[in-house]
Image (cartoon, helix red, strand yellow):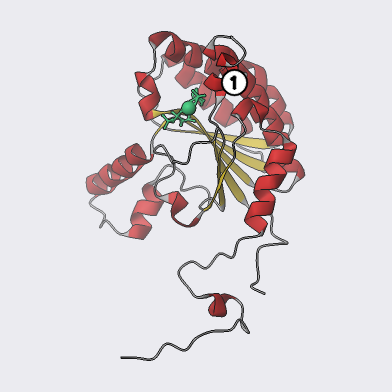
Amino acid sequence: MARTNSTAVPHHVAIVMDGNGRWATRRFLPRIAGHQQGVGALNRCVQACMARGIGVLTVFAFSSENWNRPAEEVSGLMELLALSLAREVPSLKANGVQLHFVGERQQLSDKVRAGLTQAEAATAENSRLVLNVCFNYGGRWDIAQAARKLVASGEEITEMALDRALSLAHVPDPDLLIRTGGELRISNFLLWQAAYSELHFSDKLWPDFDDAALDEAIAFYASRERRFGKTSGQITPGTPQTTVKAA
Ligand code: IPE
Ligand code: IPE
Ligand code: MG
């Protein structure tokens, strides 16, 4: 039998937290109520990740394209970010979480920008869990900003140099990428870093994503054989192989 990751808990889990709007609409609530519930789900998920020994959690909170939503929803999300920073940072700090905000900050208000910088500084010494919150983030934005940096510095554009210039250079690539909400797409998340991530799609809407759903995703991960381009036989000696003859 092919060897799997059965004993391995993923070190880095990335999540597209999708389905907040539908969660609210199904309850005849405004969409922002779903986003508020989503913050609670994220808090629970952070706790669950720490309890399972996951080292890095990267979540997609607001995409470069989410500006195209109705103005009321966008401003509601900006307010929710400011409010959540004030409410959640003290306990994240106390729990050993190191916070990073990943994305273009130029378009954010001065108040929000200052809040992000303060939250990062307040938690910089923590090391139990690295939490990357991707806000005003897009995989294409990240690759373009990294390329611009290299051009400005005159450095040669190689895979390694690009990797170092990307906004998630402080963590290894995600082992497991989860998307909630039932859609089978990436929506411009971690285009570079997810090259070899295991992909798990959950039908649960993000506010309903609980410990059992996380465990299901981890069990899925554990059942995969990660080959990184090699053959099964190279990964697990003893696996039956057909000999490839040169033509
Ligand atoms: C994800 O939930 C959160 C953000 C994109 C900000 P959605 O708001 O996309 O929820 P659905 O997909 O409309 O249900
Ligand atoms: C992806 O969800 C972005 C976040 C979860 C922040 P979307 O709801 O924006 O993705 P699409 O539009 O359905 O692809
Ligand atoms: Mg959505």
Which of the image's four quarters has the C terminus?
bottom left
* Label 1 CA crowd tier, 10 Å (few <14, some 14–19, many 20+): many
- Residue 25 versus residue 135 in the image, above or below: above
Q: Quadrant of residue 159?
A: bottom left
Residue 157 screen position, x and y as percent: 27, 56
Tell me the residue at 34%/56% (across/down). 161
What is the x, y in percent for residue 77? Answer: 49, 16
For residue 2, side relative to residue 118 (left or right): right
State the residue in front, 182 or 229: 182
The image position of residue 196, as x and y in percent, is 48, 57
Task: Answer yes or no: disc 1 within 8 Å of ligand 1.
Answer: yes
Quadrant of the image containing the N terminus: bottom right
Q: Residue at x 68, y 35 (%)?
A: 46
Give me the residue at 64% from left, 25% from top: 207
Read off the residue under disc 1.
Answer: 23
Side (left or right) of 113 relative to 205: left
Name the side, left or right, on which 201 lies relative to 107.
right
Q: Is residue 130 or residue 222 the one in the foreground?
A: 222
Let me know if residue 128 appears in the view. no
